[in-house]
Image: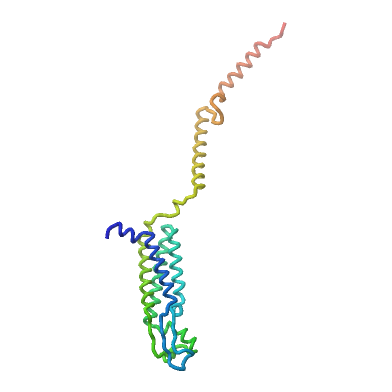
Amino acid sequence: MSDIKRSKLTGKGSLIGLVVLAGAAALLASVQAWLGIALLPGVATVEELTVTGQQITPALTLIALAALAAALVLTIAGKGFRRVIAVLIVALGGGLAYSGVQAIVNPLDGASGALEGVSGIAGDAQASLVSSLTVSAWPAVTVAVGVVLALAGVLVLLFGSAWKQGGRKYESSTESKRARAAGTATGDRISDWEALSDGDDPTGGDDDFVDGDDAIDDAIDGSGDEGLGSGPRQ
């Protein structure tokens, strides 16, 4: 596989899109019929019972919504937080896969609540109420979706640190202006200090600045002149 193709498959948009698709597929699977149960006549209020994935595992909807939320957070998360979200996505994928496997291996365990609702019987006695049981393809689909979601999380964990930080290029112009103003102000203060060290007046023009030593000499000369010319008049 070329580097270009690999970068596309492991890029930010591709992996976030994969997480979104997996979450949406899990949400769809949760409301589908997973089990079809035919009951013996007279043992319950109905003779046929359909059980959805959400009825078997109520957490399915929460897992699907959490996956969609994780995809949203990935769009703005920094490098460190991406790793946390990636681990969460792997855990969510594992939860989906586990739920599908349990529905395939032990279908009656997941349907016990629905059976109790129509028959009033709980526990192991529910098995005697069932005439036949059919498992749809949706539990297997959920297992596949969970594997894909977990794989997406692993890829985010491996390659997410190479993604560009999306928020930096949207830095506000106000902050940029403040940074430039602060830099200008600092530069001006340094320039003023250097000007004072050189004997220049940073607050006025060069023509208005009077050297301190020259001012003192002028004052002494003026006083001397006044003293010489201030004798008694005849």
Single out the residue that lies furthest toward the bottom.
Answer: 42
Question: Toward the viewer: 204 or 61?
Answer: 61
Task: Tally the marks.
Answer: 0
Quarter of the image with the C terminus is top right
Quarter of the image with the N terminus is bottom left
Q: Quadrant of residue 149?
A: bottom left
In this rendering, the answer to whether 226 lies above or below 90 is above
Q: Quadrant of residue 39?
A: bottom left
Single out the residue that lies furthest toward the left.
Answer: 1
> Residue 118 at what x, y percent from top left?
49, 87
> Residue 128 at what x, y percent from top left?
42, 92
Please name the residue shown 36% across and 71% down the image. 147
> Residue 194 at what x, y percent from top left?
50, 32
Question: Toward the viewer: 199 or 137?
Answer: 137
Please name the residue shown 45% across and 63% down the image. 72
> Residue 78 at what x, y percent from top left?
43, 57
Please name the residue shown 63% across and 14% down the image. 224
Q: Quadrant of residue 75?
A: bottom left
What is the image's colouring? rainbow
Single out the residue that lies furthest toward the right.
Answer: 234
Q: Position of 138 compared to 177: left or right?
A: left
Question: Toward the viewer: 110 or 142?
Answer: 142
